[in-house]
Amino acid sequence: MAYEFKLPDLGEGLTEGEIARWLVAEGDEIAEDAPLVEIQTDKTTVEIPSPAGGKVARILVAEGDVVPVGTVLVVIGDDAFVPATNATAKVQATPLVRRIAQELGVDLAAVAGTGPDGQITEADVRGAGSEREGRREKLRGVRRQIADHLTRAHREIPAVTYVEECDFSNVDMKLLLPTVLSATALSLREFPELNARLEGDEIVYLDRYDLGVAIQTEQGLVVPVVRRCDSRSVDELRADVDALAERARAGKLEPEDLRGSTFTVTSAGKLAGLMVAPLINHPEVGILGVHRIGPRPVVRDGEIVSRPMGNISVTFDHRVVDGARAAEFALAAIARLEG
């Protein structure tokens, strides 16, 4: 008897998932509850166990494909039945051939198969991709999520960036990020329209200050969340930032780590330039950026002196936040950092 395993509803309002990695191959025997497949969502990667034991008869969705909840992914047991409801099932190709097609950027639906019963072979795919220039790699995993997320943010949000310089003389550089988180959260209390989100024709003002922190990893940019930044000490925030950064770089963030930020802070550290305009982390309405900090000549009490100076930027959704309020918010955060 065949068992059709469909992409399950993973909660959190998710409607689709990417096949990150198959943990079995066609022809393998698998036990019930044994690891079957890794699913990448816009929150995290989830390992799904097999709902039944038996032979892996057909894998119907290739690694890297994004499919909606309810799509049949694999048939376990009798391979006489192959679902005809999947778009991916209409193309007859093995997972290996599908993977090669993804690497070469070849659309399998446009390739005529020369194998038995019209199956697409590796030679068919390589022939179709031979005239395409350059090495190609399909957007997958975190990189695909970043692309989708930022495309949506850029398309939907009329964003404006305000920039002002900050004297960091009174900031311990070893505690820079947690200090900025604290100053940002306390300033957000004064400017609630920046700690908000736009839902339809309503502005939702949030009464918590859970700030996202942009962290670069080998897989791409992730934004875990530091909770209650307005009511905790800099040392407590530092412990959270360090723990989240360690888990992010090890690929061990939990869905809860990435959920529910109200505003985001980004700092590129040693790679920070003089200035860059960060994109807003949708559905938030603002993001604060910390840019390159270094000694600069400034005038103090009528004399030119050297101070550790850097630029602070605030990019904001102009549908929700007026320019004057965004500027006042930035200046309030800077005042707290300058002491």
Image (cartoon, rainbow, N blue to C red):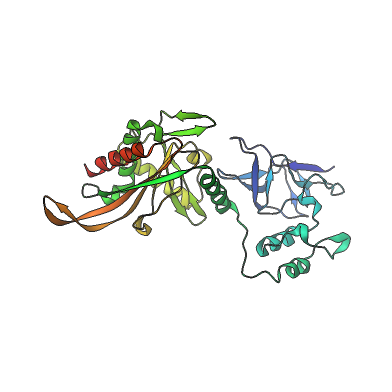
Residue in view at x 24 percent, y 49 percent: 168
**Relative vertical location of residue 38 with respect to residue 209 in this rendering, above or below:** below
Q: Quadrant of the N terminus?
A: top right
Residue displayed at 53% across by 42% down: 156
Q: Is residue 282 toward the left or the right of residue 91 in the image?
A: left
Hey, which residue is sitting farthest left in the picture?
Answer: 302
For this rendering, which residue is in front, 195 or 51? 195
| 309 shown above or below 51 | below
Where's residue 255, x and y in %? 53, 40
Location of residue 190 by image quarter = top left
Q: Is residue 94 visible?
A: no
Q: Is residue 3 left or right of residue 133?
A: right
**Rendering coords of residue 110 (x, y %):** 77, 60
The structure residue drawn at horizontal position 47% and vertical position 34%, both measured from the top left corner, is 197
Front one among 262 and 192:
192
Exactly how many numbered labels are in the figure? 0
| Image coords of residue 331 (percent x, y) | 28, 41
Using the rendered image of the protein, determine whether residue 204 is visible from the camera's viewpoint.
Answer: yes
- Residue 84 position in % (x across, y down): 83, 46
Snapshot quadrant of residue 339:
top left
- Determine which quarter of the picture holds residue 264: top left
